[in-house]
Amino acid sequence: MDKGIILNLERRTAMMESGAWNDKLITDYLDEAVTNTPDLAAIVGYQVTSDTRTALTYRELNDKVTRMAAGLAGMDIAKGDVVACQLPNWWQTTALHLACIRIGAILNPIMPIFRERELRFMLSHGEAKLLVIPKVFRNFDYEAMVDGILPELPNLETLLVIGGEGDRNFEHRLLNTAWEEQLDTGALFRERQLNADDVIQTLYTSGTTGQPKGVMHTSNTLLSNVRPYADRLHLTAADSVLMASPVAHQTGFLYGIMMPIYLGTTVVLQDIWDADYVCKVIAAEKPTFTMASTPFLADLVKTAPRHEGELNSLRIFVSAGAPIPTAVAEHAGQALNAKIVSAWGMTENGAVTMTCPEDPIERASQSDGKALPWMEVKITDFNDNDLPAGEEGSLMVRGASLFVGYLKCPELYGVDEDGWFNTGDLARMDRDGYIRITGRTKDVVIRGGENIPVVEVENLLYKFPGISDVALVGCPDERLGERLCAYVTLDENATNVTLNEIKDYLAKQQLSKIYLPEYLEVIEAMPRTASGKIQKFKLREQAKEVRLEPTKRG
């Protein structure tokens, strides 16, 4: 498969000379942890529904990784093949990533919220050869879903199901067979040895084209983000990490899978967000760091008074995905006894900007931070001219953790000859280098940290009987940042359309629930420019007034 990787010698040379890239793999750090602290807990996993706790030491994790890596090779996973997984925050995702590194495979984590429509595209486009899923999670049967689309996935040779039966059973196929005794793992791993510029991760991100894009990262690009991120927060092996954000997101992947191993410390994984439950977990495990989207922080602030004294171990809470309301930031500092840090980033880069723990609390609620070491940001006008401090413009990014291309779509890379990547976001920067995201030039709504591919949903709604025009915008929401509002006009013969009808229709199109509109406004005509383009900024202004009234008509 021609992946379309874009990585030139000039960039590599500059990154190596700066120290940003060190040519190490995450398995190098795993080896160090196994040598130095073999009996330290590497992963502590909590499954909320069953209220169960699982713990693996670094020695135990490494043993499972070795067996799984040999097993994947025994299932004909070759160097460069794609292994996909659609898993919650379970230890198996971490082990699977490490096993893929051992044998030179590429991991493609897929969010558990995705359904047939997204899976059909991602698994086909990525040419995944093997897929790992849960049998059931949150009362949803993943095996039945995948069975329904298997005939459309000719490249998918193997399906492994955690909790499944027969030959598909993950435990039976990968863990209960002593693969490491059937293969010379030392020779296998040496033969499959990756270099730090090989692609190790593909993550699909939703954009404005209606189709997800496969973001490709290497060990160098990912670890060059993890290292300065940990440094800015003063994290060491003495800290421990709590991760309830999905590890199939770049946030959870970088700071819940990779960073704990880099630090040689423990990660506590929670598979379903529940604020009361996470308070119980914090009280028991005493993590010092966590990162989550703003709604998680707001939930924890509301819940904390019921758990006085139980959350004192938490030293740092990094919040991203939406601006932190000032009141939430202030209450969080009091209720959690933790420093609140704001951050901004993308799948394409990981965290790019972040405030410092030493900053006053106002920084976290009034900015999205300043660039991490080895990353640069600037603000330009629409003619690519640099803008002075305080002026709003396009946010441009370049540096060490910038991805190396969109899978099979090199033409979409969007990085200029000087290495600047146009993020599609609008921002302003103050004289100290702190940025504030002010809007988006790309047509995406972000709900609770999740990007909603507006164009794709609009295209489906245009096929709904009776709808003439559609425009989707974000309604401000205190907890989630935005909720999706559908503005529609009707054909002259149509009398009405209801929100439930629209949601039922989209659900039948196998669209993820998170992409369904939560508000509906039926209007007489769309506001348009002289050239006929819908003026979404006007609809966004209207949406601010309807956020507490889910449906005015229908």
Image (tube, rainbow, N blue to C red):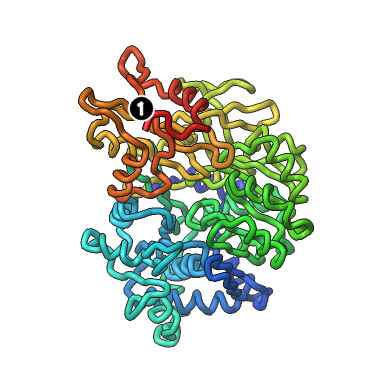
Q: Residue 393 location in percent, x, y?
A: 53, 24
Q: Residue 246 location in percent, x, y?
A: 52, 56
User: Dividing the picture into quarters, in which one does residue 104 lie?
Assistant: bottom left
Q: Residue 401 location in percent, x, y?
A: 53, 47
Where 89 falls versus 447 (above or below)?
A: below
Residue under pointer 1: 522
Q: Please indicate, yes or no, whether residue 236 appears anywhere in the rendered image.
A: yes
Task: Give the residue at x 36% y 45%.
Answer: 212
Task: Give the residue at x 31% y 55%.
Answer: 116
Task: Give the residue at x 72% y 55%.
Answer: 306
Where 21 falls versus 168 (above or below)?
A: above
50 lies left or right of 199: right
Task: Give the residue at x 57% y 32%.
Answer: 437
- Of the 4 image quadrants, the one containing the N terminus is bottom left
- Of the 4 image quadrants, the one containing the C terminus is top left
User: Dividing the picture into quarters, in which one does residue 61 lie?
Assistant: bottom right
**Observer-nearest residue: 335 or 166?**
335
**Observer-nearest residue: 434 or 340?**
340
User: Which SS class for mark 1?
Assistant: strand
**Observer-nearest residue: 428 or 4?**
428
**Observer-nearest residue: 144 or 358?**
144
Q: Residue 273 location in percent, x, y?
A: 56, 56
Q: Please indicate, yes or no, whether residue 443 appears anywhere in the rendered image.
A: no
Q: What residue type is labelled 1?
A: Val
